[in-house]
């Protein structure tokens, strides 16, 4: 029997913003891959340890956070996570 395991997750609503985090914050590097925390109401940051995606933080990113949780569960590489983020950014028309 395989032991139960899950990717940690939390969320909080602050006024009009939903903040969500999955994974671990103990990263070698954190990169904002979508939006701008100082300018945007919606953004995504990814957390890397070695060559793996280990965490994701979103503000108003309800449609993407669980996709990153699945990637972390499956042991996605950092390159795969960045490629996924780029594909999502390219698919959204500029406002």
Image: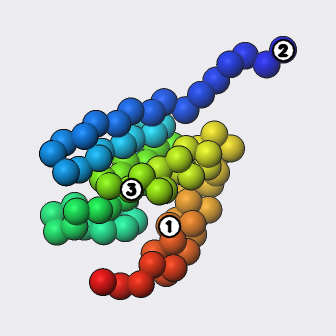
Instruction: Give the secondary structure at mark 2.
Output: loop
89 vs 81: above or below:
below
93 vs 56: above or below:
below
- Toward the bottom, the furthest residue is 94
Can you give x and y, in whole percent of width and height, for residue 84 in the image? 57, 66
> Could you give the CA–CA distance between mark 3 and mark 1, rounded to whole angstroms?
12 Å
Say whether marks 3 and 2 touch (CB < 8 Å).
Answer: no
Q: Can residue 47 be seen in this view?
A: no
> Could you give the CA–CA distance between mark 3 and mark 2, rounded to whole angstroms?
35 Å
Can you give x and y, in whole percent of width and height, for residue 80 in the image? 62, 62
Can you give x and y, in whole percent of width and height, for residue 41 in the image? 22, 62
> Could you give the CA–CA distance between mark 2 and mark 1, rounded to whole angstroms?
35 Å
Q: Which mark is residue 1?
A: 2
Q: Which mark is residue 61?
A: 3
Question: Badge 1 is on which residue?
Answer: 85
Mark closer to the chain start, 3 or 2: 2
Q: Is residue 3 visible?
A: yes
For the point 30% across and 83% down, which residue is it? 95
Say whether marks 2 and 1 touch (CB < 8 Å).
Answer: no
| Near-viewer residue (62 or 24) | 62
Mark closer to the chain start, 3 or 1: 3
Mark closer to the chain start, 2 or 1: 2
């Amino acid at each position: 029997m395989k032991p139960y395991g899950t990717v940690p997750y939390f969320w909080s609503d602050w006024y009009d913003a939903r903040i969500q985090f999955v994974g671990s914050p103990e990263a070698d590097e954190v990169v904002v891959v979508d939006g701008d925390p100082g300018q945007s109401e919606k953004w995504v940051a990814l957390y890397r340890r070695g060559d793996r995606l280990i965490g994701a933080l979103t503000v108003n990113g309800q449609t993407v956070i669980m996709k990153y949780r699945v990637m972390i569960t499956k042991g996605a590489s950092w390159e795969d996570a960045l490629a996924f983020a780029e594909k999502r950014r390219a698919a959204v028309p500029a406002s």
